[in-house]
Amino acid sequence: MSVLLLALSAGAVVGLALGALGGGGSVLAVPALIYLLGFTPAAATTASLLIVTATSATALYRHATSGNVRWKTGALFAAAGILPAVAAAALATRLPEQALTAAFALIAALAAVRMFKASTGDGPPRPVRPGRAAGAGAGLGAVTGFLGVGGGFLAVPALVGVLGLRMQVAVGTSLLVITVNSMAALLARAGSGAPLHWAVIAPFTAAAILAAWDGKRLASKVSGHTLQRIFAVALLAVAAFMLADAVR
């Protein structure tokens, strides 16, 4: 299969994940860029931030028009994560790529376990506690900067489990957090010197944006419980593959 077709196919999967699940796009984008398209881990994480920023912003618009974004909560999460994202991005440039790959796998596995245990958030929403929201947002920002991911795979279970948001509202709100944190981490990595292969990144991003619109429609037709299970299984599979690669 040609590089262009691989980029388009992988981008479509990432877009569906972001549009339907509000996260998981970066978890899928990074290994796709490394193992399918030949990127180095450093180049893959930078490219992933570009792809996920553009795709999540597009998906955010669709969710916002449906009333599935809690702007106050999302803004608090995002604001709390900006400085940790920048600081963690600077730290990540000093660590071996194998260590980053292993950390990426472990975080994905922990997020999957938490998603399996989380409720669907279909009960009454809990009042927003600024301290808890800010603390969770700071942790998400650090993960974004350190691993080069949007953080939605942690934002969704945090919004569901900590704040009691309904699944679809958590998905929409997480996209606001992903967009802001990814942009901050991308700016922090701007001087890292990692090459940007636009011949791959551009079609990957275009396919992801188009698929994100279909992901939004999928989210409206599938129950929150089912989305959580799909999300968790995908994360566990990616985590196992990357951890095996890091330790061999």
Image (cartoon, rainbow, N blue to C red):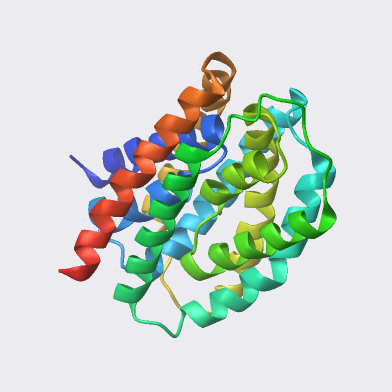
- Left or right position of 25 against 10: right
Q: Nearer the viewer, residue 240 or 87?
A: 240
Q: Is residue 77 visible?
A: yes
Quarter the C terminus occupies: bottom left
Where residue 239 sits in the image (x, y, percent)? 32, 53
Q: Residue at x 34, y 75 (%)?
A: 99
Q: Residue at x 20, y 69 (%)?
A: 247
Where residue 49 sits in the image (x, y, percent)? 52, 58
Q: Is residue 37 visible?
A: no
For residue 14, what is the image quadrant? top left
Q: Nearer the viewer, residue 128 or 56?
A: 128
Q: Residue furthest left?
A: 248
Q: Residue furthest top?
A: 221
Vertical placement of residue 116 versus 98, above or below: above
- Left or right position of 172 against 109: right
- Left or right position of 25 against 154: left
Q: Nearer the viewer, residue 45 or 6?
A: 45
Vertical placement of residue 125 versus 163, above or below: above
- Left or right position of 248 against 212: left
Where residue 117 sits in the image (x, y, percent)? 49, 39
Q: Residue at x 70, y 40 (%)?
A: 173
Q: Residue at x 33, y 67 (%)?
A: 102
Quarter the N terminus occupies: top left
Vertical placement of residue 27 versus 131, above or below: above
Where residue 24 sits in the image (x, y, percent)? 47, 44
Figure disc tally: 0
